[in-house]
Amino acid sequence: MALDSSEVQKIAHLARLGVDPQDVPEYARNLSNILAFVEQLNAVDCSGVLPMAHPLDTRQRLREDAVTEPNLRDKFQAHAPKVEAGLYLVPKVIE
Amino acid sequence: MHNKTLAELAADLKAKAYSSEELTRSLLDRIARLDPQLNSFVTVTADIALTQARAADARIAAGESGPLLGIPYAHKDIFCTDGVRTSCGSKMLDNFIAPYDAAVTGKLATAGAVMLGKTNMDEFAMGSSNETSFYGPVKNPWNLDVVPGGSSGGSAAAVAARLAPAATGTDTGGSIRQPAALCNLTGIKPTYGRVSRYGMIAFASSLDQAGPMTRTAEDAAIMLTAMAGFDPRDSTCVDRPVEDYRAALGNSLKGLKVGLPKEYFGEGLDPAVGSVIQTAIDALKKLGAEPVEITLPNTALAVPAYYVVAPAECSSNLSRFDGVRFGYRCENPKDLEDLYKRSRGEGFGPEVKRRIMIGTYALSAGYYDAYYLKAQQVRHLIADDFKQAFQKVDVILGPTSPTVAFKLGEKFNDPVTMYLSDIYTIAVNLAGLPGMSIPAGFVHDLPVGLQLIGNYFDEARLLNVAHQYQQATDWHRRAPHGFN
Amino acid sequence: MEWETVIGLEIHAQLATKSKIFSSAATAYGAEPNTQACAVDLGLPGVLPVLNKEAVRMAAKFGLATGSTVAKRSVFARKNYFYPDLPKGYQISQYELPIVQHGVLDIELEDGSVKRIGVTRAHLEEDAGKSLH
């Protein structure tokens, strides 16, 4: 399936990726090539084949309900882009 | 000292022929002198290395011994290291000082290993040439005009150039084995779940595994014994005792059934590489191994399935890089959407953006079944091929890469051609099997890697085959001119 | 024309576990901001979730109390979207194969009659963070 520039822009928006408008045609070409390549899979008959999420037949391991994590707020926020009073700051969401 | 293997260095340290501090200083000097040509390190952690070396010397003086006690190593910059920048080869994490240690980092520290620094890599491990790094490409010590392979290209170049006796790598589609092949190293990707992924920055969670890159199979066995093991912090890590991988190295190969998949010797394989592999098969026959022709009929589907599964998982895994809690944030965002789009748009390079977009598309409403679900089904077919094969053979053998190392820039603008250079390694990740690459000869003065694939948790057998082959050959002892 | 009113309810209940569903950080009410947010909760690069046994047990108990089917095989899925209170850019939730399905809850009305409410499904998920505006 070939993607055009407007579809590339839509996908970039879904992924919240700023893409320079002048780079969009090249992304469209590259992404279309990749999609054309992976579309070989369409020819394969997979009826009755289970999707494989994990190579080993394992069970989900569960954790005991115990609090073991200390408060490391200062350490985690030491290199954060913008913090104040222990909060992470972002531009205003609600006008 | 720099030409000695890890096992030889450990013996010398135990015999007090020199101290870990002396060894560490000599390698730090080599890095300072030689690495500007290669660009294999993103960060050299000299102070940490010397502190760890002195601590190891104290433990040795107190009578302690251990195969990694006082041994310097280079650490791929995908593993979190507490207090040290962990960049993952990306501008996005250029300022990220990890606040905790990865499981592998902790295990190697406990074993007394000495971290020399963090190695360059393709951005977020996405690449096969180490050209997508924010810190610039790594050069192959065998020829500075060609790529070292990727994504663990910095680790490969560092060990090949004798800047470190061993390094860590990660392998999602061949990122340990392909650079090992292109740089004349021994590298092993263990069974999925053998090594904890905790603290290893995720690319494609269902495929990622960590493993060692060394110059010999014995050294790989020593490193893997230390890196492997159960970790309750990784739900996919398998609770199963770790073997001492050195224990089986000496076993005879007599009667060993070696499967040769016909799909790995067909179209696309450079005939010169093919003939090197044939010579290696003859050498293994002399050691008593019995080649068996096999088929892995779904081989051609591995790369397309991978380029759905890996981008889909990466698009979700890399959503956390949003400029809010860590990493890069754009200047003066005008609103929230601008913060996200510019932080991510400026922080990620083109290959990472391509893969995020492919993955976003494949997971988006209406396309999930056609792409991701289909690829996961194909993955089952690929795993079943191996299952059939391992009923007849003990190990599978073939080339690691269809060609020797290619020129810098040669495939950079052609993603699909680049992706096909991983054609022999990718299926192993999709099936979750262990695979390794060992040096097998040269074409145009560039190294050729031989790939061995084992059944689940059969790492010891792979290392055994590799070690026996290395007792009978000396390819793995060859050093690149200018770095010997 | 006659109309019948049908009301569907989506109810979010916080389970009274000591630690969070996917991390060993505390869930105590009223703590200072981000003092109970560990590396896993913050979605730091490299961290991984590990499921809380007690949360699963509570979900199974709810399933049994409502006569539901408690799934032997249940699947977690990622709900991907971008918002500042969603650290990883996805919420670990359930879509196909939730842990509890097809139950009922009988309630007594004022006139003494019993009305049966169907429980279509109940699933486990992590709560997002909290935004302050």
Image (cartoon, grey):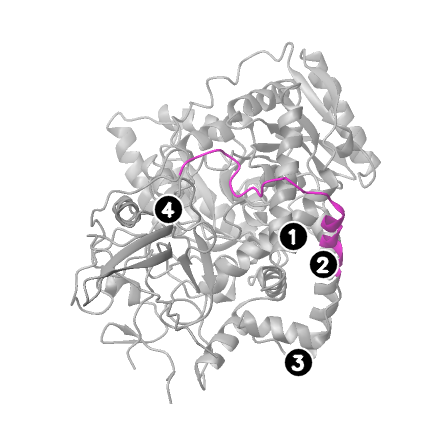
Q: CA distance from mark 3 to mark 1?
A: 25 Å
Instruction: Give the chain of mark 1.
Output: B
- Point 54% across, 60% down: residue: B315
Look at label 2 and name its amino acid: Ile
Q: Secondary structure at mark 4?
A: helix
Q: Secondary structure at mark 2?
A: helix
CB under 8 Å between discs 1 and 2: yes
- Point 61% across, 65% down: residue: B357
Instruction: Give the chain of mark 4.
Output: B
- Residue B307: numbered disc: 1
| Residue under pointer 4 | B49
Q: Is residue C21 magenta?
A: no
Q: Residues within 10 Å of mark 2 (few under 14, many from 20)?
A: many
Q: Position of residue B403 (x, y in %)?
A: 76, 41
CB under 8 Å between discs 3 and 1: no
- Point 71% across, 76% down: residue: A5
| Residue B128 seen by the camera | no
In the image shown, does B279 or C94 lie closer to the viewer?
C94
Q: Residues within 10 Å of mark 1 (few under 14, many from 20)?
A: many
- Residue A34: numbered disc: 2
Instruction: Give the foreground label among 4 and 3.
Output: 3
Look at label 3 and name its amino acid: Pro
Q: Same subunit under labels 2 and 4? A: no
The answer to whether residue B248 is left or right of residue B49 is: right
In magenta, the rendered stretch is A33-59
Q: Secondary structure at mark 3?
A: helix
In the image shown, does B222 or B459 lie closer to the viewer?
B459
Q: CA distance from mark 4 to mark 1?
A: 38 Å
Q: Position of residue B119 (x, y in %)?
A: 50, 51
In which quadrant is the C terminus of chain B drawn? top right
For marks 3 and 2, the one nearer the N-term is 3
Q: CA distance from mark 3 to mark 2?
A: 20 Å
